Amino acid sequence: MSYIKTIGFDADDTLWHNERFFGEAQDTLKDLLREYADKETVSKAVLEMQRQNVKSLGYGIKSFTIAMMQVALDLSDGKLSANAMREVIDIGKNMMSHPVDFIDGVTNILDDLSKSYELVLITKGDLIDQERKVAISDVRKWFKHIEIVSEKRTNTYKNIFSRFGNMNESVMVGNSIKSDAVPAVQAGAWGIHVPYPITWELEVAEPMINHECYFEAKSLSHAAEIIKSI
Ligand SMILES: [Mg+2]
């Protein structure tokens, strides 16, 4: 048994695939807008709109859908037909029913870790979508605590982990350096970054180098080994 008592896990692109559904949705949008803009222009416009909207609209599918609608209007100079706009809305609505597809090996790792540690799921994004994924994935068998938050800041981790014990007995594991590993370390906990093949540009950040509480892991099983060694 290691020094660690509580493990916080991010969900999207840490436990299950997520970013690829956003990529597929954008491919459909690019197809709809092909007479107005090339693919790269659409990608850049969506990212920029999300960047502008994130403070007021937050993360997840609904804010992404609004960004796609704004981009569709902007790039078509308002000429996109009402029916095509309906299709843009449907792209977003269809995302709300995408399946939960666990990343390979995750369920065995959670089986193992849940026997010795308190597991907390800490996820941001659209509330309805996150609740839906928690329900259909059956993660409550491993996680007694589920925290769906609007943003992951240092204080978010202080507030959550302080309920379970000392900050230095907690570790956060996730695919975002910016939202998972770094703010947890800044809160006084440990942070482990487990990269996913695609990183949403708004989550890109530099890893912390030479900080004894920050780790880069090759995989979730590597993260589990690190936790056991702390
Ligand atoms: Mg994530």
Image (cartoon, grey):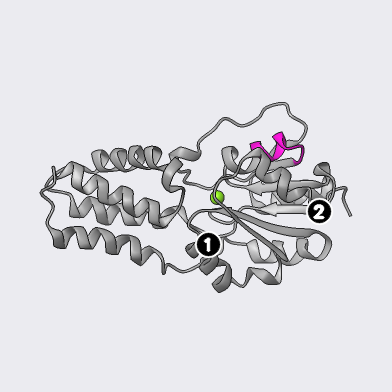
Q: Give the SS element for disc 1.
A: helix
Instruction: Left or right? Give the position of 197 relative to 223.
Output: left
Q: Main secondary structure of the magenta part?
A: helix
Which quarter of the rendered picture does the N terminus lie within? bottom right
Residue 200: % across, % down: 45, 43
Instruction: Left or right? Give the position of 90 relative to 76.
Output: right
Q: For ligand 1, tell me if the residue under mark 1 lies within 8 Å.
A: no
Magenta stretch, residue numbers: 182-189
Q: Residues within 10 Å of mark 2 (few under 14, many from 20)?
A: some
Residue 103 visible here: yes
Q: CA distance from mark 2 to mark 1?
A: 23 Å
Q: Is residue 188 magenta?
A: yes
* Residue at x 35% of width, y 66% of height: 94
Q: Amino acid at mark 2?
A: Phe
Q: Which mark is residue 164?
A: 2
Q: For ligand 1, tell me if the residue under mark 2 lies within 8 Å.
A: no
Q: Quadrant of residue 51?
A: top left
Counting residues from the N terminus, which is met first, the one under dot 2 or under dot 1? 1
Q: Quadrant of residue 191?
A: top right
Residue 216 visible here: no
Q: Amino acid at mark 1?
A: Gln
**Of residues 110 and 172, the one drawn nearer to the viewer in this rendering:** 172
- On screen, 127 above or below 23? below
**Of residues 52 and 168, the one drawn nearer to the viewer in this rendering:** 52
Residue 192: % across, % down: 68, 43
Q: Which mark is residue 130?
A: 1
Q: Which residue is outermost to the top? A: 210
Instruction: Left or right? Give the position of 143 relative to 58.
Output: right
* Residue at x 54% of width, y 50% of height: 150
Q: Give the SS element for disc 2.
A: loop
